[in-house]
Amino acid sequence: MSPSTSWSPPPLLRFAMLLAEGVVRLLTRMEVTGDIPAGLRGRPLILAANHISPFDPVAVAAAFRRLGVYPRIMANAGLFRTPVIGPLMRWQGHIQVDRGEPTAGNAVTDSVTALNGGAPLMIYPEGRIGLDPGMWPERGRTGVGRLVLATGAPVVPIAIWGSHEVIPYAAPTGMWPMVGKSLRHRPRVRVHVGPPVDLSGIDAARPGAAQRIADRIIDAITVELAPLRAGEPDVPRFTDPSRPTETRRARPRSAR
């Protein structure tokens, strides 16, 4: 697949990512490892990350700025309905996801258009902040699989760890005491870029192909996440009391 036009990030997106890096430097000690292969830069690309905290978008934006990548982001509709933040998200070129609504399919259509236009696209395949008790990635939703089937864009897995120590799951409730603690102690946040996901052998014509692609992507993210939390393989060292847990979407982690 080749882009029909060249994606040029709007100045507001560049500024927002610069601001994100400033916030990350203030609140954390962030490490970014891995890189986007040169052959995948400047072309349609899906960046797929695990989701463990409301702070993830800020941390990942700062990481992408360090890597020189400016993606459009698929984000929950609630952000777009927020005063000030919503218009800013639209002006930055991000894509609204109306989960559970009749218009939910628009996000896939808009994302295909973005990828066809040459933009890298950032997506959380789990579709929400994961609630797995061990904070491992949950089973992915089919949206990312449908994007791959529609565009043929390669997928790069992004693993993040430590962002759950910066602000709570229930933010803004309880946020400021935790921000104060982060200012004092600056927790370590790690973002790692893995190699492109191997999606070979998946028959696009067979029913369930989108879910199989999503599962393959989640497995790849899990493999990249494991070294980031090597000292916390089962139970996270830090527990956020505001974060609920459930197991109905748990994904087997044999690759761990």
Image (tube, rainbow, N blue to C red):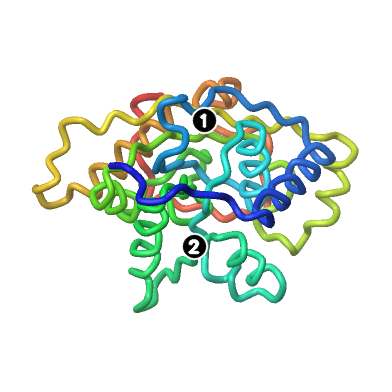
The picture places residue 192, in percent across and down from the top left corner, at: 55, 28
Of 186 and 44, nearer the camera is: 44
Residue situated furthest left in the rendering:
206
At 78% from the left and 59% from the top, the residue drawn is: 174
Residue 117: x and y in percent read 40, 53
- Asked whether, in this view, residue 155 is left or right of residue 54, the answer is left
Q: Is residue 155 above or below residue 80?
A: above
Q: Which residue is mark 1?
A: 234
Mark carried by residue 162: none
Q: Quadrant of the C terminus?
A: top left
Query: Mark 2: which secondary structure?
Result: strand
Residue 36 against residue 178 in the figure, above or below: above
- Alpha carbon of mark 1 to alpha carbon of mark 2: how far? 34 Å
Q: Which amino acid type is shown beneath numbered disc 2?
A: Ile
- Name the residue rendered at 57%, 44% in the picture: 70
User: Viewer-proximal residue, 77 or 177?
Assistant: 77
**Marks 2 and 1: in contact by CB < 8 Å?**
no
Q: Residue furthest front?
A: 5
User: What residue does disc 2 label?
Assistant: 95
* Mark 2 Cα-neighbour bin, 10 Å: few <14, some 14–19, many ≥20: many
Callout 1 secondary element: loop
Residue 123 percent coordinates (x, y)? 46, 49
Amino acid type of the residue that numbered disc 1 sits on in the rendered structure:
Asp
Q: Is residue 7 above or below residue 64?
A: below
Quadrant containing the N terminus is: top left
Q: Nearer the viewer, mark 1 or mark 2?
A: 2
Q: Quadrant of residue 94?
A: bottom right
Frontmost residue, 69 versus 2: 2
